[in-house]
Amino acid sequence: MKTLTDEKVKKVNSPSLNKYTTIYQNIEQGTINQIEAFGLPFEDRNNHKELAQQMEDLKANGATFRNNGKSVLSNQKISSACEACQKGSGSYTSFVSLKCHRDCYFCFNKNQDNYQFYLQNQKNVNQELQSLFDQNIQLTHLALTGGEPLLHPDETISFFQQAKKLFPEAHTRLYTAGDLLTERVLHGLNEAGLEEIRFSIKLEDTEKKRNHILGKIAMAKSYIPNVLVEMPVIPGTDEEMKQLLLDLEALEIFGINLLEFCFPLENAKAFREKRLQLKNPPYDVYYNFWYAGGLAVAESEKLCLELVQYALEKKLKLGVHYCSLENKFTGQIYQQNHDQKIDETYHFSAVDYYFKTAKVFGPDKRKVVKVLERKGFPYLPNADYDYVQFPIKAIPQLKEKEITIVISSNVVEMESGQQTIREVHLDLTTPAEFSLENM
């Protein structure tokens, strides 16, 4: 299929189709104009062939691809919490406060709701857990993040004690920079049944400080079953990251999550000084995503994939997992769509969790309606935009027709208790190109 940004389909033969696709091209351009106002430039449009080749090379070397290619593994070692994140079902993450002793230029905490309030105030996270239990909400994964949770060590330990009491089967994890970790805290976390701890390592730290964190990671192995590192991958840190993978392999920890590096919509000067640019295009689908991480930085994905390849070449036992920004979005789309009932012209995609439907415009409508009526497929005419909408499973019945089909991706939203279907993305295809397996 072709996206609307492909030169070949920027102008199409049907005036009504061209008018319709122009709406989305204008939305994309308007979004890009708004993003540019943040003060960080876009890279030249991505060389998709280069990324595609990286993906093919990884597949040939035995990498594991998850979540429609948004998540890539060097081997089968992945936290069950990462697997659950794909759909977001049964997962709950909280924080005591957003206070942190670090001041990373790329931190996106300021994008979170009530940031200023939670710099000065704390949540009652145990009360949150009790409320979830009282509502009979079924949880499989529980986490505590920040800020820095270990600025509140007693509250952190108490959270996991409460989690073990109320949700004994739930997988629990803690996020920390690691600086403040002590054996006393680790002992308390062990007693509370903590199953996973994720450290962040800052390559801008001195070597001495990084080695100090590696020492904390080694110490944690004696107390916590699964020890991981999770960190954004900054372009230009190739050699430092490769050495870090070797250092972590030597420590025999569970794995590392390589996050696509993001611009948090502020502090553009610091990014410009490092000659960083934004990934172009910024999104696969232009939508209001909840994840507060910001916008992907150019070249981070390329380096992440190189590191997964490096892990394969070195045969590292360490689990090396690339988690793209797009990988962070799928849980939201799944949660909004998966249990919704809408009309029969829509198909819930098990691939990307959008509701899909097909549309044909102008003169093509008559050709398609004849087939749909003969084969018994439902369809909906739209006079305003001169199209007919029908189920994508009917497309194989049109294989003899030379027509352009729009594949429409949709999200269900609830507004004042009313269900609204929002169209968020268009792809163009033909009956000959179309594959139901990819839907």
Image (cartoon, rainbow, N blue to C red):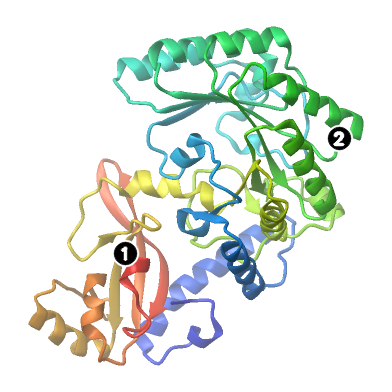
Pointer 1: what residue?
356
Residue at image position (66%, 13%) is 186
Relative to 291, say whether 381 is above or below.
below
Q: Which residue is mark 2?
A: 205
Q: CA distance from mark 1 to mark 2?
A: 46 Å
Q: Is residue 124 visible?
A: no
Q: Nearer the viewer, residue 365 or 305?
A: 305
Percent x, y of residue 351: 38, 58
Q: Which disc is residue 237 wearing? A: none
Q: Is residue 2 above or below residue 350?
A: below
Determine if residue 1 is in view.
yes
What residue do we see at 48% from left, 51% from top? Answer: 288
Image coordinates of residue 14 in percent, x first then y, are 36, 90
Find the residue positioned furthest to the front: 315
Q: Secondary structure at mark 1?
A: strand
Tag nearer the camera, 1 or 2: 2
Picture quadrant where residue 144 is located: top right
Nearest the viewer among 344 and 36 is 344
Q: Earlier in the sequence, mark 1 or mark 2?
A: 2
Decide: is 421 above or below 265.
below
Q: Amino acid at mark 2?
A: Asp
